[in-house]
C-alpha cells in the first residue's frame, strides 16, 4: 500500500472505529445473534437469522453511513488534494478505511456471539464462516456504491434518495420482479436466465451463497434451487463469490475514476 493511501486509510479507519454509529452497528448484530442463540439454541437457525439481517440491514447501513462519512469529510479530502498527492491514492485510502470499519463492525458483532456459544456447544463453523464472509462482501459492495453515488452527486439529499432507492430496489422490488418473470415465462426454459438475472443483484448472490451450504432447501427459493440444480453447491458457491467480487471492483473503480477526473 502506497504512502498516501496508507495514511488516508489509517486516519479514516481510526476515525470511524471511534464512531458511535459503528459501535451501535456492531452492538445491533451482537444483540440479535446472541439473543437468537440464547433463546433458540439452534446455530443453524441463528445463521439464517443473521443472513436475513445481512440481506436487509448491511446494505442499508453501508450505503447510509458511507454517504454520511463521505459528505462529512469532503472538506478534509479537498484539503488533502491541495497537496502534491494522487487523487486515486486519496480515494483508495478512504474506501479501504470506510469499508474495513464497516466490515469489522459486522464481523465482531455477528461473530463474537458464535464464539461465546461455541464454548459449550457444537457449532458448524463452515456455515458461520460463510455468513460472515457474505456480510463482509456485501459491506464492501455497498460501501463502493455509496462512494460512487457520493462522488457523482453534490447534493446530499439527492444522493441519499438515490441510495435508498437502490437499497429498496435490490432488497424488496427485485424478488417480486423476478417472481413475476418466472410466472410469465414458466412455459419456457428460463433457468439459465434466472442465473444470469441473479448476477445483477449482490444481495441475492449473498443469500444464495450461504443457503447453498445450509441444509435448508425450503429456504433456497427458486434462484437457489436453480443454482444448486445446474451448478451444484460448490460451483454455485464459487460463481456467486466471483460475481460478488466483481460487484466490489466495478463500482469502486468507477467511483475512483469519477473522483480522479472531477473538478472540485
Image (tube, grey):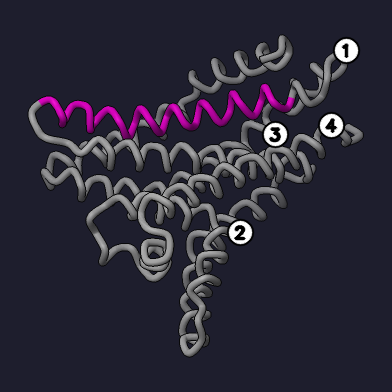
Q: What secondary structure is found at the residue carrying circle 2?
A: helix
Q: CA distance from mark 2 to mark 4?
A: 26 Å
**Residue 185 falls within the magenta-colored stretch:** no
Q: Secondary structure at mark 1?
A: loop
Q: Position of residue 48 (x, y in %)?
A: 28, 51
In this picture, residue 37 sits left or right of residue 55: left
- Is residue 111 found left or right of 182 in the rendered image? left
Q: Nearer the viewer, mark 2 or mark 4?
A: 4
Instruction: Indicate the secondary structure of the residue bearing disc 3.
Output: helix
Label 4, on which residue? Answer: 260
Tell me the number on the disc at residue 84: 1
The CA distance from mark 2 to mark 3 is 19 Å
Residue at coordinates 67% horizontally, 30% vertically from top-left? Answer: 72
Can residue 179 be seen in this snapshot? yes
* N-term mark: 1 or 4: 1
* Marker disc for residue 27: none
Comes first in the chain, label 1 or label 3? 3
Task: Say which quarter of the image contains residue 122.
Answer: top left
Q: Nearer the viewer, mark 2 or mark 1?
A: 1
Residue at mark 2: 165
Disc 2 and disc 1: Cα gap in Å? 37 Å
| In the image, residue 20 above or below residue 50 | above
Q: CA distance from mark 1 to mark 3?
A: 22 Å
Q: Are marks 3 and 4 in contact (CB under 8 Å)?
A: no
Residue designated by label 3: 71
* Spot occupied by residue 92 in the image (x, y as percentages of width and height): 69, 26
Which percent across, then down, holds residue 37? 17, 41
Q: Which residues are magenta?
A: 91-119
Precedes in sequence: disc 2 or disc 3: 3
Amino acid at each position: 500500500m502506497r504512502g498516501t493511501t496508507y495514511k488516508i486509510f489509517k486516519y479514516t479507519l481510526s476515525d470511524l472505529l471511534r464512531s458511535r454509529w459503528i459501535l451501535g452497528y456492531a452492538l445491533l448484530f451482537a444483540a440479535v445473534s446472541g439473543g437468537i442463540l440464547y433463546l433458540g439454541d439452534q446455530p443453524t437457525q441463528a445463521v439464517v437469522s443473521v443472513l436475513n439481517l445481512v440481506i436487509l440491514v448491511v446494505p442499508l447501513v453501508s450505503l447510509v453511513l458511507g454517504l454520511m462519512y463521505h459528505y462529512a469529510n469532503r472538506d478534509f479530502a479537498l484539503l488533502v488534494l491541495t497537496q502534491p498527492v494522487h487523487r486515486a491514492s486519496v480515494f483508495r485510502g478512504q474506501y479501504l478505511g470506510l469499508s474495513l470499519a464497516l466490515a469489522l463492525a459486522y464481523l465482531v458483532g455477528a461473530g463474537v456471539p458464535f464464539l461465546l456459544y461455541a464454548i459449550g456447544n457444537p457449532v458448524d463453523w463452515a456455515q458461520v464462516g460463510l455468513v460472515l464472509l457474505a456480510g463482509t462482501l456485501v459491506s464492501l459492495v455497498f460501501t463502493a456504491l455509496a462512494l460512487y453515488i457520493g462522488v457523482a452527486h453534490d447534493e446530499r439529499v439527492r444522493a441519499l434518495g438515490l441510495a435508498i432507492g437502490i437499497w429498496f430496489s435490490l432488497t424488496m422490488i427485485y424478488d417480486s420482479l423476478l417472481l413475476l418473470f418466472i410466472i410469465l415465462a414458466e412455459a419456457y426454459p428460463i433457468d439459465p436466465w434466472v442465473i444470469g438475472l441473479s448476477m445483477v443483484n449482490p444481495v441475492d448472490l449473498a443469500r444464495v451463497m450461504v443457503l447453498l451450504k445450509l441444509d435448508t432447501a425450503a429456504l433456497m427459493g427458486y434462484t437457489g434451487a436453480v443454482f444448486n440444480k445446474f451448478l451444484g453447491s460448490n460451483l454455485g458457491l464459487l460463481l456467486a463469490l466471483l460475481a460478488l467480487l466483481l460487484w466490489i471492483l466495478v463500482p469502486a473503480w468507477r467511483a475512483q475514476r469519477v473522483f480522479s477526473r472531477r473538478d472540485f
